[in-house]
Amino acid sequence: MIGPAAEAEIIAEQLGLNRTSAEILAAYVELIEELGTDDVSMKLIARRAGVGERTIFRHYATRTDLLLGAASWADRVVFARPDYDSVFDLPLALRQTMTAYGQRPDLAFLVAEAMMRGAAGTDPAPSREHLERLLWQEIPDLQEDERRSVLAALCHLDSAGTWVALQREFGMAVHDIADAAAWSAEATLNPLRSRTGAHYG
């Protein structure tokens, strides 16, 4: 099992970031939570990251680039998805992810906004590849249109955008959002249980 620092390095590599870029984003994400996006100056970010202000601009030409980069970082590091080995474990994983969004709402809103803008490096469906692989392994007889439909439903549920919509539009509490996402995933997956060779509770 790897530690948080090593995991952050792996994620930085996956996002195509060098160490300095990753340190800038990590510092900015911390400051957003402490002060909000409007009150974080480049000077503060530079001090927290241990770099000069010019270094920040060399890595992120505009404040928008920096903000969108921070959203990608938050989604992959702060809201890292829990591991699960069966597609039928997704509801529990979703419950954990939605609870994590609720515990850090400022960052959840940031990630959702970046996803809606289609920001580079921000994945609107961070669990898609994993879910697709599990569906192939566990339910290989799914027709292509069924697979697309199931994937679309599950990936839509597993997003900061869904958390924000439920919180903003309906004013739902953190645990209610987590329950709603988990129940919705169960409703999508339940008809598929009989089509596997395994037995799930």
Image: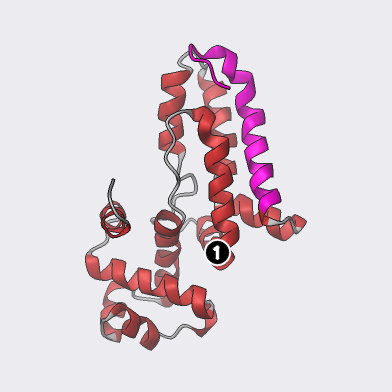
Residue 195 within the magenta-colored segment of the rendering: yes
Foreground: 156 or 187?
187
Please identify the residue farthest to the right as the structure is shown.
170
Q: Residue at x 41, y 74 (%)?
A: 28
Name the spot of residue 94 as percent of width and height, x first: 56, 43
Q: Residue at x 51, y 56 (%)?
A: 115
Crowd class of label 1 (few under 14; some 14 to 19; many from 20; radius 10 Å): few
Q: Quadrant of the C terminus?
A: top right
- Closer to us: 89 or 120: 89
Residue located beneath label 1 in the image:
104
* Residue at 31% over, 58% down: 8
The N terminus, quarter of image: top left
* Residue at screen point 71% across, 60% down: 168
| Quadrant housing residue 186 | top right
Label the magenta part by its dominant secondary structure.
helix
| Amino acid type, mark 1 | Arg
Residue 15 part of the magenta segment: no
- Answer above or below: position of 19 versus 131: below
For the record, the magenta segment spans 175-201
* In the foreground, 150 or 74: 74
Q: Position of residue 84 (x, y in %)?
A: 44, 35
Please, what secondary structure does the residue beneath circle 1 have? loop
Is residue 173 rendered to the left or right of residue 120?
right
Position of 147 with respect to 77 (left or right) is right
**What residue occupies the far bottom of the structure in this picture?**
43
Q: Is residue 28 above or below residue 198?
A: below
